């Protein structure tokens, strides 16, 4: 790792496979299918491994659908808050499930989609109008949400053409939260389930987090399957696949002083780890503690001109030196898929530590990547 050019995202395949094994156990014991949500994790250079364990991908539009088709194979489920007519033929041709957000979109595009793929299974996303999502920004069932059809807007005349229902109501939540959502979903839409082929429980299941009740989830899924044995049940986690599977490795470029000690890194929270600002959350730094807990405290900041490009205050056992590596933990999900070239700051390269320990740099970015987006 000491030879690694920074900034660099470093995926550890062994950690990824551990997550995949947990997901595979759920598939096996509960008899459900699990898809990768590309929105949160789309590092296709690792899909050889992911596709050995998961059943396919869920895509949010044409580009993610094409990536799944090209690089993952297996099942492709495409949902978008609103499709464009021009994209339907290509999406329909490569997808296995197509999920619409509203009855109007269903009516507008179902015939065209079927024309391009007669085997396509059509679904509708519904809004169970129940969620305990901890952050309103990530609450698909919040007040006035545009995501999914509510019970009053549901159109039962679609049953027949409709083969499945989809809901997505969780964000980093546990099996108990799913149980509550499922109760609301069944109360509102349970009457239709006997005429359908599948149900998709969406993402937001924090399955691979240490204290997640995996056996509780399996029991919940088994009970649902016992009640509706004719239904195929899908889960589509994103974050849980990439959870704790790799780091962002960076370097201290300078140390300045203005009331406190401030280290400027060759990365940016704004450009490379935007959820630290948006969500917001504090990324863990290897070997560090909270401000003041260890003898040497520094504010870590990015190399953009944004004043608020700050990762937070961290303390260390030794004083930081220019050239030191600063390693941010758990930077595989919602990072690469969201990163920008703001301020012309170079995108981190991407490396994979293979199971035998060797590190392979699979992608580097340069000036052209900045120029060609404009
Ligand atoms: C975001 C999203 C997911 C994945 O959510 P995670 O929190 O990453 O598990 C799955 N399905 C839909 C429809 C989503 O919007």
Image (cartoon, helix red, strand yellow):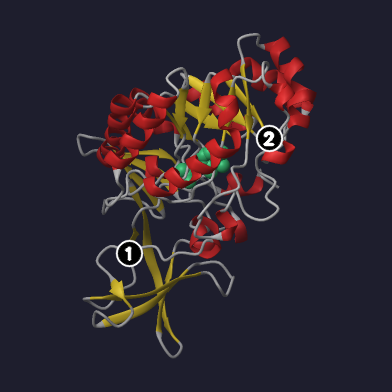
- SS label for mark 2: loop
* Above/below status of 302 relative to 347: below
Tally of marks: 2
Taking the image as drawn, is residue 36 in sight? yes
Q: Which residue is mark 2?
A: 101
- In the visual, does 60 lie left or right of 49? right
Residue 322 image offset from top left, x and y in percent: 34, 71
Please identify the quarter of the rendering in which residue 312 is found: bottom left
Q: Which residue is mark 1?
A: 285
Residue 110 image offset from top left, x and y in percent: 73, 20
Q: Is mark 2 within 8 Å of ligand 1?
A: no
Residue 183 image offset from top left, x and y in percent: 49, 41
* Above/below status of 273 relative to 231: below
347 or 150, nearer to the observer: 150
Q: Is mark 1 within 8 Å of ligand 1?
A: no
Q: Give the spatial CA distance, label 1 vs label 2.
A: 39 Å
Residue at the image position 35 percent from the left and 43 percent from the top:
207
Please identify the quarter of the rendering in which residue 358 is found: top left
- The extreme bottom residue here reads 259
* Above/below status of 284 relative to 258: above
How packed mark 2 is, by other alpha carbons closer than 10 Å (few <14, some 14-19, many 20 or more), is many
Residue at the image position 65 percent from the left and 47 percent from the top:
371
Taking the image as drawn, is residue 39 in sight? no
- In the visual, does 153 lie left or right of 241? right
Residue at the image position 45 percent from the left and 64 percent from the top:
281
- SS label for mark 1: loop
194 or 64, nearer to the observer: 194
How packed mark 1 is, by other alpha carbons closer than 10 Å (few <14, some 14-19, many 20 or more), is many
Residue at the image position 48 percent from the left and 50 percent from the top:
171
* Above/below status of 140 relative to 123: below
């Amino acid at each position: 790792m000491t030879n690694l050019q920074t900034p660099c995202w470093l995926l550890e395949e062994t950690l990824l496979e551990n997550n995949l094994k947990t997901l595979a156990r759920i598939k096996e014991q509960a008899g459900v299918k699990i898809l990768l949500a590309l929105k949160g994790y789309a590092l296709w250079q690792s899909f050889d491994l992911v596709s050995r364990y998961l059943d396919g991908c869920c895509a949010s539009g044409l580009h993610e659908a094409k990536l799944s088709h090209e690089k993952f194979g297996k099942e492709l489920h495409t949902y978008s808050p609103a499709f464009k007519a021009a994209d339907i033929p290509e999406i329909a041709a490569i997808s296995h499930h197509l999920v619409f957000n509203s009855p109007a979109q269903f009516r507008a595009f179902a015939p065209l989609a079927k024309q391009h793929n007669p085997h396509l299974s059509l679904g509708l996303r519904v809004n169970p109008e129940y969620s305990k999502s901890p952050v309103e920004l990530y609450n698909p069932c919040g007040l006035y949400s545009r995501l999914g059809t509510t019970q009053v807007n549901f159109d039962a005349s679609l049953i027949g053409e409709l083969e499945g229902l989809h809901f997505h109501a969780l964000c980093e939540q546990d099996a108990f939260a799913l149980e509550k959502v499922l109760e609301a979903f069944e109360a509102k839409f349970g009457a239709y389930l006997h005429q359908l082929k599948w149900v998709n429980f969406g993402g937001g299941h924090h399955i691979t987090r240490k204290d997640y009740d995996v056996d509780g989830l399996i029991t919940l899924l088994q009970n649902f399957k016992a009640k509706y044995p004719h239904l195929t049940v899908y889960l589509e986690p994103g974050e849980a696949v990439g959870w704790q599977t790799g780091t962002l490795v960076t370097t201290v470029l300078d140390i300045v002083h203005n009331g406190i000690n401030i280290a400027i890194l060759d990365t940016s929270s704004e450009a490379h780890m935007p959820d630290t600002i948006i969500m917001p959350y504090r990324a863990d730094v290897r070997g560090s503690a909270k401000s003041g807990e260890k003898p040497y405290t520094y504010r870590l900041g990015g190399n953009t001109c944004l004043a608020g490009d700050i990762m937070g205050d961290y303390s260390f056992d030794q004083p930081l030196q220019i050239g030191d590596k600063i390693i941010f933990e758990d930077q595989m999900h919602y990072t690469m898929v969201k990163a920008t070239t703001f301020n012309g700051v170079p995108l981190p390269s991407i490396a994979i530590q293979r199971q035998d320990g060797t590190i392979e740099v699979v992608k580097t970015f340069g000036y052209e990547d900045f120029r060609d987006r404009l």
